[in-house]
Image (cartoon, rainbow, N blue to C red):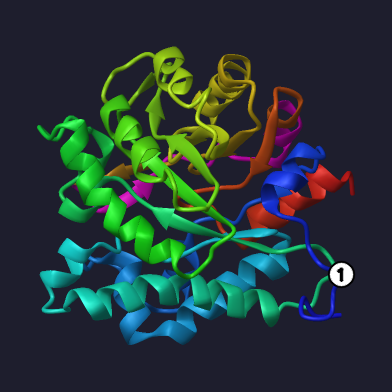
Amino acid sequence: MTSDTAPARPSLPRALAEGLVVVLDGGLSNQLEAAGHGLSDELWSARLLAEAPEAIVAAHRAYYEAGASVAITASYQATFEGFAGRGIGPGRAAELMALSVELARRAARETRTERPLWVAASAGPYGAMLADGSEYRGRYGLSVAELERFHRPRLEALAAARPDVFALETVPDTDEAKALLRAVRGLGVPAWLSYSIEGDRTRAGQPLEEAFRLAADAAEIVAVGINCCAPQDADRAVSLAARITGKPVVVYPNSGETWDAGARRWVGRSTFGPERVAGWRAEGARIIGGCCRIGTPAITDVARALSGT
């Protein structure tokens, strides 16, 4: 049966409140690059919103078919400022951001499954727009108010397309987290907040206890956690996020490989595996998937591990 004829799906916050453990997708770039789409552009996958929307639908559908119940949209690097650098005006930019949600919805409609499928509208950090690596450092020299003014218009554009949830993701420091927590207020869309971390600290060096605590009392935040980090760092952070916030935890780390900038290739071996999933779940993770270098086979493994098959 298609998702159009399936029983009405609960909201994602309700599903989490009822104890459902949800499988998240993997890296969107994995699927797009495998299909032959270059992503070295400063807009990254957001460039394909205008140039190859069908490719984005196919990538989302591949993850849904692999077992994911949540697809993250191709809007991580979609900003008014970034589009303006390509001569795309604010009206068209807002249309493209909304389109990112619509494409994921279309993929859900085209997927034959009886399980509920949801769409998470991605909002990456300010540094992703800069495309200079600062998204992994934070500390941009901007105030919380300035960061809030940057994020609010794009969140409004995404909210207009009625996603199930915002993915406020790869957040490198607490200043940006504070800005995002302010920016989502009043938009009528629940959100998860996930930090990019190294060890027991944010990428900017703040203790994770401090970072997670910011979201503990935020009504809009339905899950807190980590992404775009080493799997072993996620192991340690999941229980901390659950204990500090009392909220469901979202976790989607990278493969564990590292990028060799000189050789321009990934090195090392993947340390992401289904054997970690049971531990994350036991510690409070309720949304589980993968980020960079995690493709459909790994998401199928996650889905099987969570279903016990």
Where residue 281 appears, as percent x and y from the top left, is 73, 31
Name the one closer to the observer, 199 or 97.
97
Seen at 27% across and 44% down, the residue is: 260
> To which residue does mark 1 refer?
7
Where residue 201 appears, as percent x and y from the top left, is 38, 18
**For the residue marked with disc 1, what is the amino acid?**
Pro
- Work out which residue is located at the far front of the displayed protein and give it: 186
Q: Is residue 303 left or right of residue 175?
A: right
Name the one closer to the observer, 136 or 17.
17
25 versus 112 height, above or below = above
Q: Is residue 45 left or right of residue 58?
A: left
Q: Is residue 303 left or right of residue 249?
A: right
Q: Kindly indicate the quadrant of the structure image that contains residue 43.
A: bottom left
Residue 273 is one of the magenta-drawn residues: yes
Tally of numbered tags: 1
Element type at marker 1?
loop
Where residue 304 appears, as percent x and y from the top left, is 81, 50
- Is residue 257 something one can see in this rendering? yes
Where residue 90 appears, as percent x and y from the top left, is 20, 73
215 versus 171 height, above or below = above
Provide the residue span drawn in magenta: 262-279
